[in-house]
């Protein structure tokens, strides 16, 4: 599970705007589990809405040491 990005690189300590920051953003694909729960709770409309819900994720990379990881946001 992805968590919030730290304010500094966990490896070398480089701060945001000094080389540590998001390099790529994407949306996690459709969720079958959320579609099932939405279908049970709200019928077909809930199933469609549940399937369409995904998470916005960002890949953060350090320009200094090269470390990268995926975080929420």
Image (cartoon, helix red, strand yellow):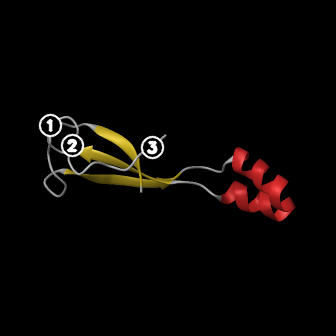
Task: Indicate the secondary structure of the residue bearing disc 1.
Answer: loop
Instruction: Name the mark on residue 12.
Output: 1
The residue that appears at 22% across and 37% down in the rendered structure is 66
Instruction: Please state if 6 lies on the left or on the right of 56 as rendered.
Output: left
Where is 16 relative to 68, above or below?
below
Image position of 5 with respect to 69: above or below: below
**Residue at the (42%, 57%) spot, across then down:** 73
**What secondary structure is found at the residue carrying circle 2?**
loop
Residues at discs 2 and 1 in contact (Cβ within 8 Å): yes
- Which of the marked residues, 2 or 3, is nearer the chain's N terminus? 3
The residue at the far front in this view is 41
Give the residue drawn at x 86%, y 60%: 43
Instruction: Report whether 5 appears left or right of 12.
Output: right
What mark, if any, has residue 47 been given in the picture?
Answer: none
State the separation of the CA atoms marked 2 and 3: 16 Å
Depicted 14 relative to depicted 43: above or below: above
Which residue of the protein is positioned furthest toward the bottom in this rendering?
45
Cα–Cα span, label 1 and label 3: 20 Å
Is there CB contact under 8 Å for labels 1 and 3? no
Please give left or right for residue 72 compared with residue 29 in the image. Answer: left
Q: Position of residue 49 (x, y in %)?
A: 72, 62
In the depicted view, which residue is nearer to us: 34 or 41? 41
Residue 68 located left or right of residue 39: left
Q: Which residue is mark 3?
A: 2
Residue 3 picture location, percent across and down: 41, 46
Do labels 2 and 3 touch, CB within 8 Å? no
Q: Which residue is mark 2?
A: 9
């Amino acid at each position: 599970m992805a968590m919030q990005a730290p304010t500094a690189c966990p490896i070398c300590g480089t701060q945001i705007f000094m080389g540590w920051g998001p390099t790529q953003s994407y949306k996690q694909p459709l969720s079958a589990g959320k579609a099932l729960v939405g279908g049970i709770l709200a019928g077909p409309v809930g199933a469609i809405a549940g399937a369409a819900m995904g998470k916005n994720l960002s890949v953060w990379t350090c320009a200094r040491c090269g470390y990268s990881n995926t975080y929420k946001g």
